[in-house]
Amino acid sequence: MSGNVPISQRNADFTAPTPQNTPLSNAPITREALSRPTVGTIGEENEDGAAAGAAAALKANPALAGLIQNKLSGLVGRSSGYIESLPSHLKRRVEGLKGIHVDHTKIEAEFQKEILELEKKYAERYRPLYERRAAIVQGKQEPSKEEVLAGEASHEDDDDEDEEDDKPEKKSLADATAPADAEKGIPEFWLTALKNHVALSELITERDEEALRSLVDIRMSYLPGSQAGFKLEFEFDPSQNAFFTNKTLTKTYYYQDEVGFSGDLVYDHAEGDKIDWKEDKDLTHKIETKKQRNKNTNQTRTVKRSVPVESFFNFFSPPKPPKNGENEDTDFDELDERLELDYQIGEDLKDRIIPHSILYFTGEATAYEMDDDDFEDEFDDEEDEDEEDDEDGPARPANMAVSAGSQAENQECKQQ
């Protein structure tokens, strides 16, 4: 098992198995073969009954199911013998194509390195904007009149679409000033932004919120030199943080040196800072109290133990793939899910939340994500309808209405 997760496609560097049923030699179809008696097709009812019976048999015999699973797993990646059966001159050409692919892989690696350098270049251009944002959020500076006007203009188009005739015109905030006793900055800016991200909102508990109220900035930086990866830095206000003494907590994601099967960089592992919790403030554990009675003396004693609990701050203790010799008790499916989730959250912080934090704070980013989900659901619904049509009878092509509409539009354009 590998804990590596590709950047754009999980298991992209996984080698696909060759077809297990590839014939060793091609058999020509003859008239004699066509005239031979054939076996009738199995009806759906019989097929479903056979499948149900096989499933019941495997369920009743876990040992047999495990044996079959091991056999099937052993076939993955194994050759069917087709390539080995080819004549030497054909195998020579196959090896030549592999040689060309080696050169292609080298160019892919150079391409990814150039992309990484380009990302680093633009990260430096973004940096002054992020520093300016942090100063406003923390109350060290106020936005300029030009910045406020630009912000108001950015959503004027949306307001125009929803504007009613009798709706009063909005007054600009460009010249507004804060009272002398007003609170500085934007309280709970990052906590609100994180909670408006679907995956992160599920990780943040009520206890976590108390600690995250002291979160004043999140930054991202690429690893220096030729290292491939990035670092996330969470900055906390010590005067407001009653849970741990760290002023900053970092999480670093490392990529492998080589590219994956699809030509993308491959995620290798992550490392997080150790959190220095204050006494009885560890949000990743809870203390359970249990009474034990001595059978001989009949005396009782109270035993306390620390038990792990769900918490956002487990993010800084990322899962790690098992090393050699540590595979006996590992649940690989669960580990894969944890690794994928951990990597995805890191990528979302890097590519979405940090660059667009103001849109997550206002909730606009959530609306965009929901629109994307609805768009995907529409396609899923169409596929379901097509499947239902297949069961009832011949289905009308899903693109028929679109094609007809396109023809009508084209005809209208010609007439004009």
Image (cartoon, rainbow, N blue to C red):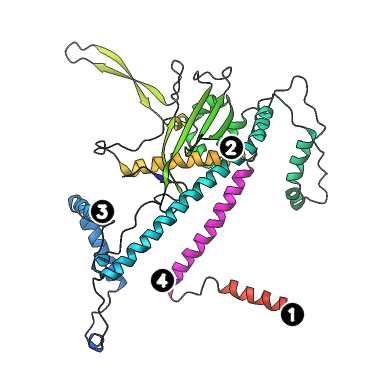
Residue sitting at x 50%, y 18%: 245
Q: Which quadrant would residue 91 be assigned to in this image?
A: bottom left
User: Relative to residue 391, is residue 363 depicted above or below?
Assistant: above
Q: Badge 4 local density, few (<14 within 10 Å), some, or many (20+)?
A: few
Provide the secondary structure element on which disc 2 rests. Answer: loop
x and y percentages locating residue 280 in the rendered image: 43, 17
Q: Earlier in the sequence, mark 1 or mark 3?
A: 3
**Pointer 1 local density, CA inside 10 Å: few below 14, some 14–19, many at least 20:** few
**SS for dot 1:** helix
Distance (Cα) linking label 2 and label 4: 48 Å
Circle 4 residue: 391
Q: Magenta-highlighted stretch: main secondary structure?
A: helix
Please tell me how crowded label 3 is: few (under 14), some (14-19), or many (20+) other residues with Cα within 10 Å: few
Decide: marks 4, 3 in contact (CB < 8 A)?
Answer: no
Say whether residue 249 is magenta.
no
Q: Secondary structure at mark 4?
A: helix
Q: Tell me the residue that label 2 is attached to.
A: 354
Distance from disc 1 to disc 3, alpha carbons, whole Å, reads 62 Å
Quadrant of the rendered image containing residue 335: top left
Where residue 172 sits, quadrant-wise, is: top right
Q: Can residue 252 be seen in the rendering of this structure? A: yes
Distance, label 4 to label 3, CA atoms, is 33 Å
> What's the distance in space between the residues labelled 1 and 2, CA to CA?
51 Å
Gap in angstroms between the C-alphas marked 4 and 1: 42 Å
Of labels 4 and 3, the one closer to you: 3
| Residue identifier under label 1 | 415
From what the image shows, is residue 343 above or below residue 240?
Answer: below
Magenta residues?
A: 364-392
Dot 2 or dot 3, earlier in sequence? 3
Residue at horizontal 59 percent and vertical 52 percent from the top? 371
